[in-house]
Image: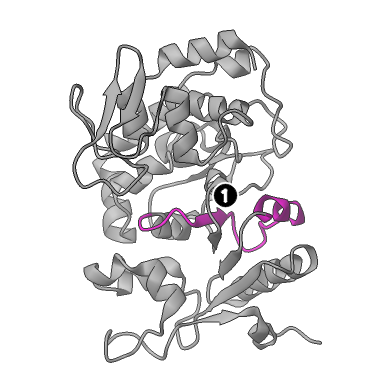
């Protein structure tokens, strides 16, 4: 990787940008809670002038790139190009693209989206009370989650310049490849940009997790993202492509979260079948919405929970039954089932 590129990106980084990206509280000149070990008192020193970091508790130290590598669980020496790509995403630059140092994503025929445009759209989202209120009041999704997923708001040529919600898609290296868009309001569908191929929403999460929830759609993925990074989304019931399977080769558990309708059941069946063929060692589960209304999904379930229970959403979905005695409005249990019960979805021997 070009040394000039790394120097340019490094000069565009700051500890403020990095800690903001990772939702770490930071005040210049003050030690912070170390994210690399169980730290009860701030023991990580960040030097903005050098720039370096050093933890007096666990001993981790290095520069911007080392910090990012540790957060992303990437071997900095063996995969420095991946670290640099993530660093550029955080810095909001596109030096790598200009130098043609990065291969184009095989899932995208066009060049990568400009990170500055993504940031601009997010800033416009922050300024739109109407959109923030819709996410929070209608979907229970907080602004911090929207920031984590780079959700934006702004005009789009596909809808005659009308302002729409932007759901940016990234490849596993963190490069932005295309948006899916949605007009504000209930009953509106999310649609792909013209010419864009199907991709995985929140794909960078696959670099650092062993268990993953696969949701049918972006809203359900954002719902789970509030309480776990073990999630990716697929753009609709028919959006999962066989080529996607390769991206999951390092995970140990997959939990399918299709909606409670025929399309959702087909979504679960198709993906389970592909995993059984390609990676049978991966434990495969699906959420059974038995007793719930037609089209019921993760977001509907989340909204039915109390504030306290929402904090435990992944745990509730994966480890216990929901009993009527705990939630009065909940009908019979929602169970997490192993693929050994796969035939109940309608699969024939």
The one nearer the camera, 95 or 29, is 29
**In the picture provided, is 78 more to the left or to the right than 223?**
right
Q: Inspect this view and state whether residue 124 appears.
A: no
Residue 341 position by quadrant: bottom right
Under circle 1, the secondary element is helix
Q: Position of residue 269 (x, y in %)?
A: 69, 73
The one nearer the camera, 245 or 131, is 245
Query: Dividing the image into 4 quarters, which one contains the N terminus?
Result: top right
Q: Position of residue 286 (x, y in %)?
A: 57, 75
Residue found at x 74% / y 83%: 347
How was the colour assigned to the protein in this rendering? one colour
Please tell me whether residue 96 is drawn above or below residue 187 in the rendered image: above
Residue 331 position by quadrant: bottom left
Query: Dividing the image into 4 quarters, which one contains the C terminus?
Result: bottom right
Please tell me whether residue 222 is drawn above or below residue 5 in the rendered image: below
Start and end of the magenta stretch?
Answer: 226-249
Confirm whether the magenta stretch covers residue 87: no
Residue corresponding to mark 1: 206
The one nearer the camera, 190 or 248, is 248
Please tell me whether residue 340 is drawn above or below residue 318 in the rendered image: below
**In the picture provided, is 18 more to the left or to the right than 240?**
left
Residue 63 position by quadrant: top left
Q: Inspect this view and state whether residue 315 appears.
A: yes
Residue found at x 34% / y 25%: 53
């Amino acid at each position: 990787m070009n040394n000039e590129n790394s120097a340019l990106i490094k000069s565009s980084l700051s500890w403020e940008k990095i800690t903001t990206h990772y939702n770490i509280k930071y005040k210049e000149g003050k030690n912070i809670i170390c994210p690399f070990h169980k730290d009860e008192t701030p023991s990580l020193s960040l030097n903005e002038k050098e720039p370096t970091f050093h933890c007096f508790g666990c001993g981790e130290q290095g520069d911007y790139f080392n910090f990012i590598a540790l957060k992303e669980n990437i071997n900095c020496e063996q995969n420095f190009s991946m670290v640099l790509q993530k660093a550029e995403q955080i810095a909001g630059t596109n030096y790598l693209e200009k130098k043609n140092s990065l291969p184009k994503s095989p899932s995208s025929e066009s060049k990568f989206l400009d990170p500055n445009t993504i940031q601009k759209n997010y800033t416009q989202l922050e300024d739109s009370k109407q959109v923030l209120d819709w996410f929070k009041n209608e979907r229970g999704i907080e602004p911090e989650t929207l920031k984590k997923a780079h959700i934006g708001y702004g005009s789009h040529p596909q809808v005659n310049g009308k302002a729409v919600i932007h759901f940016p898609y990234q490849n596993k290296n963190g490069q932005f490849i295309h948006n899916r868009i949605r007009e504000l309001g209930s009953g509106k569908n999310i649609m792909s940009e013209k010419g864009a191929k199907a991709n995985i929403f929140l794909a960078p999460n696959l670099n650092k997790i062993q268990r993953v929830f696969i949701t049918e759609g972006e809203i359900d993925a954002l719902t789970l993202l509030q309480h776990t990074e073990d999630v990716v989304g697929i753009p609709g019931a028919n959006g999962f492509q066989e080529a996607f399977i390769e991206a999951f080769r390092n995970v140990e558990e997959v939990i399918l979260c299709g909606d409670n309708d025929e399309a959702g059941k087909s979504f679960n069946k198709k993906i389970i079948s592909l995993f059984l063929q390609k990676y049978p060692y991966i434990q495969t589960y699906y959420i059974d919405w038995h007793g719930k209304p037609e089209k019921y999904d993760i977001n509907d379930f989340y909204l039915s929970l109390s504030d306290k229970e929402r904090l435990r959403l992944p745990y509730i979905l994966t480890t216990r039954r929901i009993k009527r005695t705990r939630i009065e409005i909940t009908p019979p249990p929602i169970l997490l089932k192993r693929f050994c019960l796969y035939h109940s979805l309608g699969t024939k021997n």
